[in-house]
Amino acid sequence: MGIRQVAPVLEADVDPTVAGEERAHVPGTRMVEGEPVPSGIDALAKVGMGGAHHGAEPVDERRDSGQLADEQLLELLVDRHGCWHGDIQACDTDSSGGGTRSAAQPRSGCETLSPAGQAAGRAAHRPTRNLPRVHPFIAPSILAADFARLADEAAAVAGKPDRGADWLHVDVMDAHFVPNLTIGLPVVEALLRATDIPLDCHLMIEDPDRWAVGYAEAGAHNVTVHVEAAHDPVALAADLRAAGARAGLSIKPGTPLEPYVETLRHYDTLLVMSVEPGFGGQSFMPEVLDKVRAARRMVDTGHLTLLVEIDGGINESTIEAAAEAGVDCFVAGSAVYGAEDPARAVEALREQVVRASAHRGWAS
């Protein structure tokens, strides 16, 4: 599909109840059930974890990374996943001292809300975008799991409290954008009922502008689309965030980063592919790490506010190079699900990252 370059604009404001249908709006606001709701920087300044006011400010590009780091220390008391689970959560103190962790609560009354109401509730409890990462994220990819036992495979990487998988990576392929065919929304909905690990849905599909919002409305924590497939990535990011998910943008190994820097200002996650998308078990492509380094510099200097994720060929032999380049979240398939103890494999990979990037001050 053709790629349409997008000029820097404010987040598009779209009614989440009608996917893809643009509505008249006031710049800086979006509409939920007919009412204006702050979006973009305005929303970040007003909405924090559980609706608390953290006083977040727009990123000033003139501030150095030290100033940004000092300000971000105020945001350390958050869920270790940096996320919510669709409802208000009860949080207790993380025993590691690095923040808080959330205890899943019954979805009291949630079933009676309309999809738009549920999406608005998720968006209201989303943390601000520039949360620091207390430790590196490991996201096991179920592409390498046993598809006949997905609930069990999700449980296998949950591990001990604060030691298991941070996200569960779900590869959705349509046999059009990529040659492979995997799973779709019904399986994602079933997984959401089977695990409380936040789902990281990577959509390798044509026309994500039409289909991606459904995954956010279902309750996926992070929904990533490909810049090579999206017709209007800025508007799509706004739609995903309005539906209650983090918005992720992925680039193939051959796609340069520079043309999409302005677009990435509207996203929460950058997924750098280190293999050609479509199949698991491929060899890591180290040349993509230059894009990781460039993204890391922009994040550290405040020009971008997002999590840097990598996917493809990540294992015990390649993860340290990715960590040194500046990755925050590591997708690993065979390295986790091919191990005798998948939960322990997650811990071991995280420990490697902490050692390889000690300058970032990770907690193990």
Image (cartoon, rainbow, N blue to C red):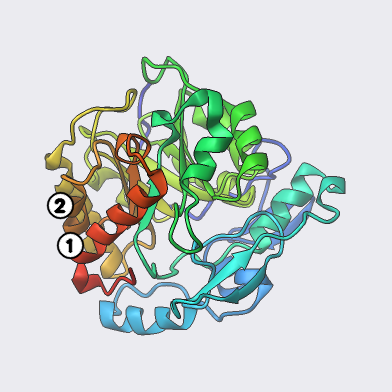
Between 15 and 94, which is closer to the camera in this rendering? 94
Between 299 and 362, which is closer to the camera in this rendering? 362
Circle on res. 321: 2
Q: Is residue 235 visible in this depiction of the protein?
A: no
Residue drawn at x 22%, y 51% is: 292
Cα separation, mark 1 vs mark 2, equals 8 Å
Between 354 and 159, which is closer to the camera in this rendering? 159
Q: Position of residue 201 (x, y in %)?
A: 49, 39
Give residue 215's quadrant in the image.
Answer: top right
Q: Is residue 159 left or right of residue 250?
A: right
- Judged from the image, the secondary structure of the residue bearing numbered disc 1 is helix
The correct choice, above or below, for 133 with respect to 171 in the image is below
Q: Position of residue 58 (x, y in %)?
A: 46, 73
Residue drawn at x 56%, y 74% is: 45
The residue wearing badge 1 is 356
**Residue type, mark 1 in image:** Ala
Task: Please report contact status of discs 1 and 2: CB closer than 8 Å, yes or no.
Answer: yes
Residue farthest along the left direction in this orientation: 287
Q: Earlier in the sequence, mark 1 or mark 2?
A: 2
Q: Is residue 152 visible in this depiction of the protein?
A: yes
Q: Is residue 304 left or right of residue 32?
A: left
The correct choice, above or below, for 79 with respect to 188 in the image is below
Q: Position of residue 256 (x, y in %)?
A: 21, 40
Image quadrant holding the C terminus, namely: bottom left
**Residue type, mark 2 in image:** Ala
- Judged from the image, the secondary structure of the residue bearing numbered disc 2 is helix
